[in-house]
Image (cartoon, grey):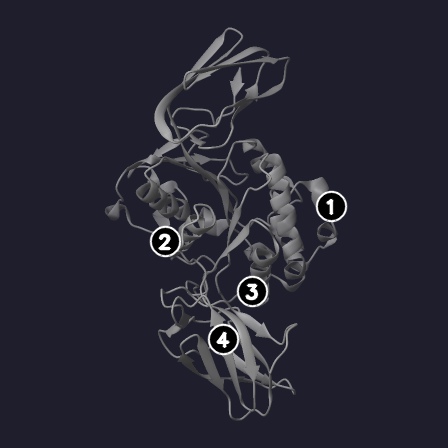
């Protein structure tokens, strides 16, 4: 009997979902768990036994027999399981956030599983690790901050399955035949071609899907926490990004046997680099959340670092992911998206923008310097802005009739516009397919 490494001491199983136990072997498979006895014949090769769903609790023992071999798994918990996926910003370790002298408290209800990566460097083998102050530094910072919030708030065990690879393109996480049969799979942009040349070990179509994702399926999950996009940030990739996210969502829902598996997508943060196309991929990520069922957006417009593609304010990112999960999964009346421009009016040398999601009104922490007004000649002038409740009034007297506007549409900018509860406003670009007054 060869059990998948996911099935080890300290594992966390997803509550309220069928429990799938999988591995390889031949013979009569018997599983005892929570007072129930499951029997299944295994003619050879892979097996996958499905156990009844259960409520949160533990620790429990699970006994698995196949032929003459018996395995007993100890300290098994039932709670909430999330897959933390993407590239290097999800991979960034807690040890890069806090010094050893500031070790956090042990969190025995948080367990962490590492999917092996093509690139070397993971501190753990393939087994569940109980989070404590000794081993937490090698864990994803976002995963740590997110999971410990979950434990404190809901009091249940939380399992994080880490499945990320630095510098990975989105196409590598999608099943190859599915990708190549779609129009999005035919695009080979400069950025994608460059990524394949520089990182040929893992940026081939479908490679990380086969090497990492499929290896942990169909383990039951609550949701996917997804932070990726820097390796797809050019104009051509932005044009197909919504389609790629649709393929990723559908592909993973199929392999994890969950037709409603949600994706909580972190928008890439502003930074100066590459071909200055960051605003386009950020806009595409927002569009994916608007157009695709079960895909949600977490914004990072205020945490960027001008010359750093890896912003260090990961605790704030985790907090927004946590708020999003509380809202979209647990149905709590809590906001996680900042102000979004919903209506506008252009005039002579001025414009008015109305926002939703302000939490009681727009606020600023400094002069807004990332809003530009444009006229019919293409002239672009930084506007002087004033906040009035849910409205932002902008003036540029040197312009004539305003015909367009850009907010947060530079590779790097400093965010100064927030909701009443401190969430950053979303970028926008006009004109678009809507009317103006």
Q: Nearer the viewer, mark 2 or mark 4?
A: 4
Q: Quadrant of residue 401?
A: bottom right
Could you tell me how far apart the alpha carbons at marks 4 and 3 are, in whole angstroms? Answer: 25 Å
Residue 152 lies, with reference to residue 58, above or below; the image says: below
Location of residue 13 in the rendering, given as x and y in whole percent from the top left corner: 44, 30
- Secondary element under disc 2, as helix, strand or loop, is helix
Residue 197 seen in render: no
| Marks 2/3: CA–CA distance | 22 Å
Cα distance in 3D space between marks 2 and 1: 37 Å
Please, what secondary structure does the residue beneath circle 4 have?
A: strand
Q: CA distance from mark 1 to mark 3?
A: 25 Å
At 37% across and 65% down in the image, what residue appears?
422
Helix, strand or loop for disc 3: helix
Q: CA distance from mark 4 to mark 1?
A: 42 Å
Image quarter where the C terminus lies is bottom right
What residue is disc 1 on?
A: 180
Q: Mark 4 vs mark 1: give the one in front.
A: 4
Residue for badge 4? 354
Q: Which residue is identified by label 2? A: 315
Residue underneath mark 3:
278
Q: Earlier in the sequence, mark 1 or mark 3?
A: 1
Disc nearest the viewer among 2 and 3: 2
Question: Crowding near pointer 2: few (<14 within 10 Å), some, many (20+)?
Answer: some
**Left of 345 or right of it: where is 361?**
left
Q: Earlier in the sequence, mark 2 or mark 4?
A: 2
Q: Residue furthest top?
A: 68
How packed mark 3 is, by other alpha carbons closer than 10 Å (few <14, some 14-19, many 20 or more), is: many
Residue at x 66% of width, y 72% of height:
433
Residue 307 x, y percent position in the rendering? 46, 65
Label 1: how many residues lie within 10 Å, few (<14), some (14-19) or many (20+)? some
N-terminal-most mark, 4 or 1: 1
CB atoms of marks 2 and 4 within 8 Å: no
């Amino acid at each position: 009997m060869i059990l998948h490494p996911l099935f080890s001491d300290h594992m966390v199983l997803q509550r309220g979902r069928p429990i799938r136990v999988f591995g390889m072997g031949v013979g009569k498979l018997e599983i005892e768990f929570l007072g129930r006895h499951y029997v299944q014949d295994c003619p050879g090769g892979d097996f996958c036994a499905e156990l009844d769903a259960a409520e949160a609790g533990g620790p429990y023992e699970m006994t698995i027999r196949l032929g003459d071999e018996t395995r007993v798994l100890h300290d098994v918990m039932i709670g909430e399981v999330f897959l933390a996926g993407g590239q290097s910003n999800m991979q960034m370790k807690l040890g890069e956030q806090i010094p050893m002298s500031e070790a956090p408290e042990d969190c025995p209800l948080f367990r962490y599983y590492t999917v092996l990566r093509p690139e070397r460097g993971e501190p753990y083998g393939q087994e569940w690790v109980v989070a404590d102050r000794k081993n937490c530094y090698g864990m994803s910072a976002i995963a740590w901050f997110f999971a410990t919030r979950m434990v404190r708030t809901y009091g249940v065990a939380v399992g994080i399955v880490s499945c990320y690879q630095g510098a990975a393109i989105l196409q590598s996480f999608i099943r190859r035949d599915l990708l190549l049969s779609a129009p999005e799979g035919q695009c080979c942009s400069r950025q994608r071609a460059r990524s394949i040349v520089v990182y040929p070990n893992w940026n081939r179509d479908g490679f990380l899907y086969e090497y990492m994702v499929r290896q942990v399926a169909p383990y039951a999950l609550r949701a996917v926490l997804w932070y990726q996009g820097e390796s797809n940030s050019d104009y051509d990739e932005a044009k197909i990004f919504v389609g790629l996210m649709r393929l990723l969502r559908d592909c993973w829902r199929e392999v994890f046997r969950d037709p409603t598996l949600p994706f909580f997508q972190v928008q890439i943060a502003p930074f100066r680099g590459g071909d200055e196309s960051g605003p386009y991929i950020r806009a595409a990520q927002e569009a994916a959340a608007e157009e695709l069922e079960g895909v949600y957006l977490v914004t990072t417009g205020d945490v960027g670092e001008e010359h750093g593609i890896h912003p260090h304010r990961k605790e704030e990112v985790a907090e927004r992911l946590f708020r999003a999960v509380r809202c979209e999964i647990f149905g709590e009346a809590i906001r996680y998206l900042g102000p979004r421009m919903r209506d506008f009016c252009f005039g002579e040398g001025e414009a008015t923008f109305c926002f939703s999601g302000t939490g009681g009104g727009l606020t600023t922490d400094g002069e807004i310097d990332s809003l530009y007004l444009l006229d019919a000649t293409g002239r672009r002038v930084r506007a002087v802005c004033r906040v009035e409740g849910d409205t932002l009034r902008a003036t540029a007297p040197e312009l004539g009739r305003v015909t367009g506007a850009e907010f947060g549409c530079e590779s790097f900018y400093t965010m100064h516009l927030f909701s009443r509860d401190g969430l950053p406003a979303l970028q926008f670009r006009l004109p678009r397919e809507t009317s103006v007054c």
